[in-house]
Image (cartoon, helix red, strand yellow):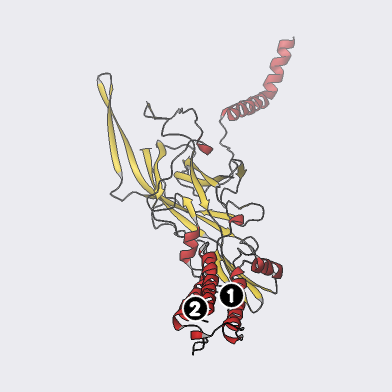
Amino acid sequence: MMEQEAQKWYSRNKKFVWVVLAVILLFAFASSIPSLSITGTSFNQGTQGLNFNFATIQTPSGSEVAINPQAIDYQASGGPVIGGSIGPFTVDTSTTNNRVYTWQIQNGTATDKYQANLVECSMSFDLFESGTGPEAGPAYSSGFSNILVPSPTSYNGYNIWIKITPQQAIPFANNPNEFYIAPAYIGLTSSVNWGIEKVGSSGTGAPAITVAQINGAEETSPMAQGDVFPIYYAIGGASVPLSTTDSFQGQPLSPVLFQNQYYIELNIQKLAAVNSYSILYGSFGHLWAFPTGTFDLTCYVWLVGEWTTYFSPGQLPTQVQHATQFGSSITAFGGIANFLNDLLNPFGNLSWLVWVFVLIVVLLVAYWYLVKRKPKEGEGTGKLQNKYFGISLTNWVILGGLAIVDIFDIEIFPIDILTDIGTLGFLWYIWQRRSKEG
């Protein structure tokens, strides 16, 4: 009875039953399709190649600080901001520097042939500092005018790590052509230039800062043309186990070369603003310039498979070096305490003014004692009564020479002390001669 009822119900609703079954099967089939959704943050170029990003900055104490992968944007306490930018990655397929290597591997009775290409590529990145003035250095420095690099605001001993990731970017989710790349060499195409313009005095009276002075104040490793960036498997150069599942036409690829990520290190030995100072009309002038440098890299890449998407040299705009940031300030009657402290400090930059004053006083006293003062009873005049105020022309020349050297030997220790002693000693010699000539 129930079987007959079921057959009748199916006969009346068989279309509905088949629709339900079809929907169930469709959902089951759809759930078996692998998802194409992935996670990510950004990329520099949507082509195959090596993707460069700033990874971390390492302080002199060894601690690692996360930085902006595209712009660095790091600032130590009281220091300027370190910035950076990543340039384009291009592939030169036409250069004669490219090489093709082939291997023959015996496979039973057959011989399999494999090919790998060494391809020349290029990329660049910028490194620069920026600030508003106080980060460049103190607003006052002793001395009438000088140029210096203030160490308190430099980034000596810092390391910037750059991450390199092989990127398989084509318009299709599954690459119909096998493609594997690995960096073989990364080095500087040209030496780094840390400034691109001359910085004038800007009305501060301070000496102008030249590109040569900026270049002389900065130092990184690598920095000179031909310098090589060692390629690391991990930040800090730590040893890591090497393995890979990549293979080409059934032939495993070397884990020494083919990895998912690599790192290069830029060691900062000196990176600081160049400051120029002056004292002008009772005011203190301050002129500064922050360094900026472009690192042009030549890269050679191992290619196994077919490289189908890339940018060629000249296809993208060339990275332009970040402009040298400079500024100036005038502090009216500022830093008086610093000025006086430096003036009275016997080893300060301005202490020579005190020595000049002392020398003038000594010469005046000597002139009075040797020429103007009336001799006491028993003291003779001898040769002192001549047209050179009682002192021979030779002695005047020697005394004047000592005085000039004494005035202009600023901060040349111990020459400054020796010339002071020499000047006073020669005055004593003249006085002794005068006494004997009586």
Q: Residue at x 53, y 85 (%)?
A: 381
Residue 264's disc is: none
Q: Mark 2 is on which residue type?
A: Gly
Q: What is the x, y in percent for residue 407? A: 54, 73
Towards the viewer: 339 or 190: 339
x then y, percent, for residue 37: 58, 37
Residue 166 image point, x, y percent: 46, 40
Residue 317 image point, x, y percent:
45, 59
Drawn side of residue 110 relative to residue 69, left or right: left
Q: Is residue 422 left or right of residue 131?
A: left
> Visible in this render: residue 306?
no
Left of 12 or right of it: where is 44? left
Snapshot quadrant of residue 366: bottom right
Local crowd size for mark 2, using a 10 Å CA cut-off: few (<14), some (14–19), many (≥20): few
Q: Which residue is mark 1?
A: 359
Which residue reaches farthest top?
1
Pick out the residue farthest to the front.
378
Residue annotated with mark 2: 400
Q: Residue at left 60%, top 47%?
A: 67
Q: Are marks 2 and 1 in contact (CB under 8 Å)?
A: no
